[in-house]
Image (cartoon, helix red, strand yellow):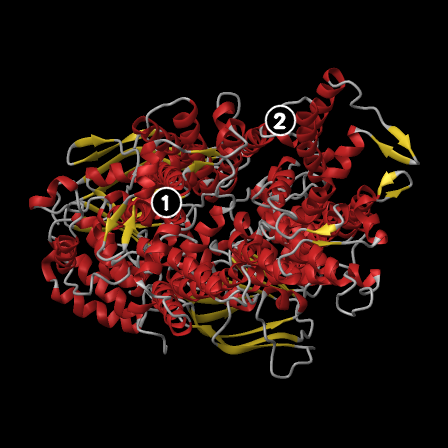
Amino acid sequence: MNSIASVLLQMNGIQKSFPGVLALDQVNFALRPGEIHTLMGENGAGKSTLIKVLTGVYPVDSGEIILHGNRIEPRSPADAQRAGISTVYQEVNLIPSLSVAENIFLGRQPFRKGLLSPFKILDWAAMKSGAEAALLRLDLRLDVTLRLDSHSIAVQQMVAIARALDVSAQVLILDEPTSSLDVDEVKQLFQVMRRLRDQGLGILFVSHFLDQVYEISDRITILRNGKLIGTYKASELPRMELIAKMMGKELADFESAAMAAPRRVTGADLPQAEVERSPKTLLKVQGLGKLGSLAPVHLEMKKGETLGLAGLLGSGRSELARLLFGIDRADEGRIELSGSQQSEGLSLSSPRDAVQAGFALIPEDRKTQGIFPDLSIRENLILAFQAKKGWFKTLDLKAQYALVEHYIKAIGIVAASPEQAIKTLSGGNQQKVILARWLASQPQLLILDEPTRGIDVGAKAEIQKLIVSLCQQGMAVLFISSELEEVVRVSERVVVLKDHRKIGELKGTEISEHAIMNAIASHSDPELAAAGTSATGASGGGGS
Amino acid sequence: MARLPKLQTQFIPILATLATFLLLGLMGSLRYTGFLSPGVFLNLVDDNAFLGIAAIGMTFVILSGGIDLSVGSVIGLTSIVSATLVEKHHVPPGVVIPLVLALGTLLGAGMGALIRFFELAPFLVTLAGMFLARGIALMISLESIQLTNPFYQAVSAFRVPLGGALGLPANGLVFLGVLGFGIYLASYTRFGRNTYALGGSDSSALLMGLPVGRTKIGVYALSGFCSALAGVVYTFYTSSGNASAAGGLELDAIAAVVIGGTLLSGGSGYILGTWLGVLILGMIQTAISFENTLSSWWTKIIIGGLLFAFIVIQRSVIRPSSKTA
Amino acid sequence: MKNSGRKGSSFSSVSLSPLLWPLVALGLILLFNFIFTAGFFQVRLQDGHLYGSVVDILTRSSPVMLLSLGMTLVIATGGVDLSVGAITAIAGAIAAVSLQSSGLTGSGGVALPLAIALPLLASIACGLWNGFLVAFLGVQPIVATLVLMVAGRGIAQLITHGQIISISNSAYHFIGGGYFLGFPFSVTLVIGVLAVVIGFSRKTAMGLFIEAVGNNPVASRYAGVNTVGVKLLVYAVSGLCAGLAGLVISSDISAADVNNSGLYLELDAILAVVIGGTVLSGGRFQLMGSIIGALIIQALATTINTRGVPVQLTLVIKAMVVLAVCLLQSPSFRARFRQSTKPRLPRITGAEGVTLKAQSDSGPSGSGGL
């Protein structure tokens, strides 16, 4: 890849804002023909907005997109496709109920020729052979007459890629294609990607799996909070530095911070946790796991302890929370709760069981899993407690208001009236109401999945403070956050996850952002790494 | 994973339809003499022609993930409009029939446009269409109007000779024609395949650049056209126009579609299945009329039972695939 | 009901008070009659019974009012119950057969309390069946309740052997034709059921659970709400309400006419609920609104009747009402007329939310011009 390599796609000064959020702020991006360029960033970095701008889902506020030297303004995915930009998403955007061949040709099917041509009759035979040819380009042979959903997700993605290529794509966007693939399928996908790169295609790749990113990428562009952090050659960007940039740190800052005293102790705004209150074990998790979601995990939590779960996006943090709360059913493992009668461990087949057992979960996605937008603050707040009590043992209105008033004061919820619909509150206040919902149910274990996402700085600090004081009252908290700083500040112990498995545990003074990142960076999946070297070898000088 | 071979899951509902059809035929012919005679079969096709035509239109709507409650009312409306124009205003049938077909298509397209542009629930919009069409029909005439026009008489009497005393009536012919056209539309045109795609996943269809809006409106227009044509066939069949004709026919049509193996959530099914579904409904009726001890209400109960059975079959087919989606 | 505290809602939105528009509509119809129909509001007292057009509207709408109460709860959970019309027929049939002198016992039929209890139990069973399909098998509500809508009338015919069975029990006739304190008993029954349903849903936490399930099913599950139980219950209540309506209908005509009992009433009930301000997609529900909705439907019909306009026009007007209500509730319809005065996405603050909303917004525009 030399410096005069031509540019296939150029995005200059892209600006995009939504009411209240600046999603992309003067972002520049360049894609060369014959390269695999990875876009990285944590949640809210602007990756998906950038892709949606590029594919015409959103119009830009300002800035320009230049493809092959021509300025384009795609107004719909179809528009972008015609211009030569195709996207394959993690959740394959094809029609599962139709055949593979048909999915490749939908909307542009060939018609029968000859005598029947005036009738515009679809030519199924041509579609079949055309689909086979398109898949062959990816070195894939399969029965194209089968329904798409009778194939694995990996194959479905290949079909999506085949369709994209057949529509004559020059730019191929792969948005988290590997998230639901197993190791072999990833290998297969990477082979296809390399082959296409060698054919001169520009591939924009999005992934959270560090090992994969390093294995496949030629260059990496990092976004954070809607801003471009920079574009780097993959071979010249150390992992530590990549992680630091994604987290919004300079590596230098960190190394000096790592030498200083651990931040948790100095965090002046946090009341210090008591030292060793001869804590009792509350929860024992043994080998809890689910195929394709989480490798078996062991955990132990004490009363009044904050356990942080650290890891990059997609590392299995939320999956662990879902298993613990009975949303997904574990294939294996057991959960033991001290004081519970069942000696064979808890059986959590639904969140309701978990709630009854004294668990609480503040889910990752507040909008779709947390709030009841049209219901009032009061109703949102009392719901979990009421559900725990059952419908007949109703709290009378006076008790409800007392409860609501208590939490509005205690947590500092800013609202005009408890009867206000929760959707009218700011994100931070909505989150506080959900927090209050669970506090009112008096749980033993509180699981917080990204409780401070999309919340302003002030509210963030308040929620962090609250968590620590809850622990002092004896509640155990499992704290999940993609902001390492936060994890470090709040947690007494940190479990580090990567690629859907637990890779380490830090406690006490060991906890630092540096240590966590080090754990993530240094651990690499032995299987994939081995696969990677051989595969890279095979397609040697592909990048040039 | 001891599941059935994957190839088969998509065919389970239609195979169940075929099995039901054959089983009913077999049981009927074992029990009643002459049950499977060509004559009875031709009657089946003729008697159920207007239901069948409406059901084929309904199939497209359901394949696209929607529902159309207005089909029965549109049949009533077109039959009474035809009869009024022909008998009272002496408009030639050659003008009336295209006119009422256009009317039905327009009504369907209008409902489709409301559903598409304002993102309204198909259930409510077509419910309004149902009230509207029935209301207008009843305002035109409360009484049934006899059709004495020679054209209608001729069509009623027309038979395609099939050797011997057998003949295929015009209605049956139209039904088979619509069936053929429906199969062509569904399987051999882009419109038809887009309809399947829409029902399979409308968000994907949009991202694939398919004309989602046009297809949606087209599907309801097609259903409106089929209902109007069913109304015309009704006038041939009964030689009359009746504003309250085909009340509740939409239920039978939906039942025929579901029993015909089309997934009510859309995206999967066959026009031929609907044809079998209509014949199954007809056969149940025939069998019950052959059986002296069974009363007519058993038809409804058996159809309800079949509906339930097919819904359960559909659940078992949807479950595995929805996991991967 | 307790929404008066809502702040910041704009004047153009319906959220001013959910009952406002239905009341305005009803008021307009009554006002029209007050001006143009002589004696519309005249109420006569005859033999201690009230008579008059207004009383007539109340009496005639009582079956739909009963159905709409159950339907409101079902719709609030995001469902719909198409089988209520058929259930009224089943209930009427069971009542008639058990009261028949040649019926079960062969000696003047069973006792009246049993003749009332049996149909109601059967109705609840029908409701539970619907609930089972929806909550346990996860079948779409429209489809699930279609089964009983089709088969139910057949079952009712099976019970009565396809005949119209007349009911001669005078005590039974009281349900639909009697008077209680001068008021038609059916109206009293509606008020009673309304009070019970309001009490049951607003004085216990059930109403909250129902609204929660309809407003956000995922969040309800995560909050530990027994979503399966809630759904089962609302369909059972809907079945029970349909059973009561079936008793009123059969008692009113002193016969079980299974072919016509409750025919198309499910549609009127759904209409009443939607007019009453409960949105078809679920969430907040308005029991009083549904009652007003049922009254609007009947008032329209009665008005048309007394004006000498052909009855058939009722259907056309109903169609217009359905469309008007649909359009008023359609966010994209409202957006089209408010675009200039209000920002498009007022309530969304987070970036993730924007993604979601904008994606669905791209729906129509994406395929525009096609």
- The residues bearing labels 2 and 1 have C-alpha atoms spaced at a distance of 43 Å
Q: Residue at x 29, y 56 (%)?
A: A98
* Front residue (pair B252, A439): B252
Frontmost residue, A289 versus B76: B76
Query: In the rendering, at what x and y percent does residue B194 appear?
Result: 29, 45
Residue A500 is situated, as x and y percent measured from the top left of the image, at 41, 67
The residue marked by circle 2 belongs to what chain? Answer: C
Residue C293 place in picture, x, y as percent? 68, 35
Query: Do the dots labelled 2 and 1 sit on one chain?
Result: no
* Location of residue A461 with respect to A414 vertically, above or below: below
**Which residue is located at x 47 percent, y 46 percent?**
B250
Q: Secondary structure at mark 2?
A: loop
Looking at this view, is A57 or B292 the one in front?
A: B292
Question: Outermost residue, front direction?
Answer: B165
Report if residue A515 is visible in the image. Answer: no
Q: Residue furthest bottom?
A: A343
User: In the rendered picture of this protein, how many numbered marks are placed on residues?
Assistant: 2
Label 1 is placed on what type of residue?
Gly
Where disc 1 sits, the SS reads helix
Mark 2 near mark 1, Cβ–Cβ under 8 Å? no
The chain ID associated with circle 1 is B
The disc labelled 2 sits on which kind of residue? Ser
The residue that mark 1 highlights is B57
In this picture, is C191 found above or below C38? below
Label ID, residue C10: 2
